[in-house]
Amino acid sequence: MKTRLLPALLALLGSPVFAAPAAPAAAAPAPVLKPAPKGDYIESFDTLYNNLTIQREGTRVELRARSRRGEFYESIVDVADPLDLILEYSRTVYAAAFFQPEPKRALIIGLGGAGVHRLFAKAYPDAVLQTVELDQKIYELCQTHLEFHPTDKTPVAIADGRAYVKRDTAKYDWLLLDAFRGGYVPAHLKTEEFLRECAARLTDQGVFINNLHEGTELFYADIKTMQKVFAQVVLLNPANSGNVMAFGVNYKTPVITDPSKWPDAAVVGKRFEGRVNLAAIKGELMPIPREVAAAKVITDDFNPAELLNVIKTNNESKGR
């Protein structure tokens, strides 16, 4: 898409045709669900938004999205132990508890395989976790193949994430952007304008969590854009994942960039019953890369996300 078309598209997203449900949103209408095959299987699905593969071997189910660059994990779930967070980055999401340990309401943009959702519902049974998912088929597969059973505490709205946030009026303690489509986040979910809309949806002590991919110039632009919007930004780098979890808050005090001032990991992590090692996750803290200083802020009018995403950067040679 040419850059000059993006503002026009965003105007459409905000129109009644693309309107998200008013918050709090009711769960999406229950579709007619086709049960998963018995035993091991591989199935493929082409939707308006995704090319999906879902595969089961034993008790492990993988949901992958295909693109020209290959297949990318949306989620991996052990259906015999659905609370087990197999993908490293999904554990690091819970570092949000260092900054807001008692979330009452959370929003996730992107359902994936609902890997984060199950533990959140277990750890915070009185909290509401609202999800916004664009692709109805992903929502269906989560229920039929990945043991996700939405409740009134974990509702799912089928909508574009930006349209939903724009029309939403609720405030959230945690707001997670995890809306990948085949290894990339749609460009309209990366701009300064959208991040400001997310920042406006946070409570006073709320935290925004952004799942980023390192290794390209887009990574630096993403961080620079977050710095433009949020008063403080912290990066955590799960080992061997290729992901960097970026946390942003609207306040300047207390300081969150110094991990020595974070609350005790053992105390904050009690709710997770050993599923998340917050002490180890604290060690994933990484400095802001020096390349961020020269990066461009992504806006609705300047959004070369696809170009930046293919410009590779050797992080190791730059001494990150």
Image (cartoon, grey):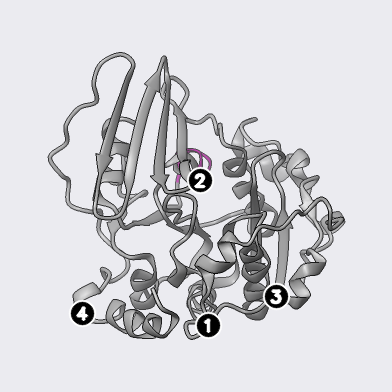
Residue at image location 45% in from the left, 30% down from the top? 77
Question: Which tag, 3 or 1, sits closer to the chain's start?
Answer: 3
Question: Which tag, 2 or 4, sits closer to the chain's start?
Answer: 4
- Image coordinates of residue 315 in percent, x first then y, are 77, 54
Name of the residue lying farthest toward the left: 32
Question: Which tag, 4 or 1, sits closer to the chain's start?
Answer: 4
User: How many marks are shown on the rendered structure?
Assistant: 4
Q: Give me the C-alpha separation between circle 3 and circle 4.
A: 35 Å
Which residue was labeled with disc 1? 302
Residue at image location 60% in from the left, 49% down from the top? 93
In the picture provided, is 105 more to the left or to the right than 16? Answer: right
Q: Are marks 2 and 4 in contact (CB under 8 Å)?
A: no
- Image coordinates of residue 193 in percent, x first then y, are 50, 81
Which residue was labeled with disc 2? 124
Q: What residue type is disc 4 on? A: Pro
Question: Which tag, 3 or 4, sits closer to the chain's start?
Answer: 4
Q: What residue type is disc 3 on? A: Ala
Residue at image location 66% in from the left, 80% down from the top? 228
Q: Is residue 120 magenta?
A: yes
Magenta-colored span:
118-125
Instruction: Pick the residue in front: 319 or 124.
Output: 319
Q: Nearer the viewer, mark 4 or mark 1?
A: 1
Q: Nearer the viewer, mark 2 or mark 1?
A: 1
Tell me, for residue 16, which label it has, or none.
4
Instruction: Pick the residue in front: 183 or 133.
Output: 183
- Image coordinates of residue 113 in percent, x first then y, are 40, 40
Q: Is residue 113 visible?
A: no
Q: Give me the C-alpha separation between circle 2 and circle 4.
A: 34 Å
Binning the other alpha carbons within 10 Å of mark 1 as few (below 14), some (14 to 19) or many (20 upward) gives some
